[in-house]
Image (tube, grey):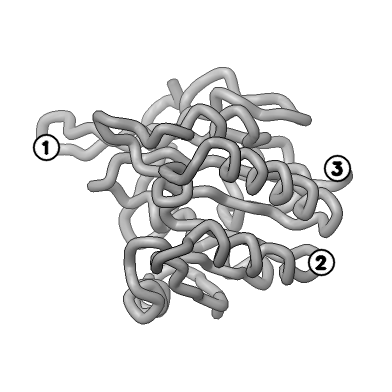
Amino acid sequence: MSGRLTTGIDVLDRQLDGGIPAGSIVFLGAEPASQSELFLYELTAVRGTLYLTTVRSDAAVLDAVHRTPGTVGSPTVRDIGGGAPLDSANKLVTELPEGANLIIDVVDVLEETSTARYREFLNELQTHMVNTGGLAVLHGLKTGDAPRNRRYTEHMSDVVFDLQTEVDGSEIENRLAVPKFRGGKAPEKTIKLRLSERVTVDTSRDIA
């Protein structure tokens, strides 16, 4: 995988030495009640994006993207949350053009399919992203009971973003950990973020 692809968040790109290697699969794990979707929406501004939604309707996703105050693009949104989500995802992934973004929000639905079929999907996805030099982001929810194939998602992903959201007194604190960065150097410390209208790095306090 040659070259780096921007995340759409300049300060985060600098923390990652220029962005994410082309052809990568990224897993973004976050609490259900967090602003993690801002990462997905801002990513649509930097490249053509296919946005696969498994829980919300395509209309709901498009409305959310258009209402985001930050810079966003015009993604192609497809609702694959019907009776055969993995089959639908497989078909659409094979049609991805060169250098495109793929977003799956949320991947939990696919992770609940059979282990053999899900592993096959991840391997085919990885091959396609490498061949096209694109970027796939799998958005997963951190809940008490993880989907049965979550460990395969984390293992197959080249980069893992772990968004940690906590209420500290009168403030909501967001920290991004990057515990895994295949093909690059992972930041040794968590990155404090501001997630309001858009994703920015919190420079008011030391990064720790």
Q: Amino acid at mark 3?
A: Met
Which of the two discs, 2 and 1, sits closer to the camera? 2
SS at badge 3 = loop
Q: Earlier in the sequence, mark 2 or mark 1?
A: 2
Cα separation, mark 2 vs mark 1, equals: 45 Å
Residue 105 at what x, y percent from top left? 44, 57
Q: Earlier in the sequence, mark 2 or mark 3?
A: 3
Q: Which mark is residue 129?
A: none
Query: Which residue is depicted at the point 36% across and 81% down?
Result: 59
Q: Which residue is mark 3?
A: 1
Q: Amino acid at mark 1?
A: Ser
Q: Kindly tell me whether residue 123 is visible in this rendering.
A: yes
SS at badge 2 = loop
Query: Is 105 rendered above or below residue 184?
Result: below
SS at badge 1 = loop
Which image quadrant is residue 134 in?
bottom right
Tell me if 77 is positioned left or right of 144 in this view: right
Which of the two discs, 3 and 1, sits closer to the camera? 3
Question: Can you say which quadrant of the picture contains the C terminus?
Answer: top left
Q: Which residue is mark 2?
A: 98
Q: Kindly tell me whether residue 22 is visible in this rendering.
A: no
Residue 61 at what x, y percent from top left? 38, 72
- Return the residue nearer the eye: 148 or 208: 148
How many badges with numbers are in the image? 3
Q: Which residue is mark 1?
A: 170
Q: Earlier in the sequence, mark 3 or mark 1?
A: 3
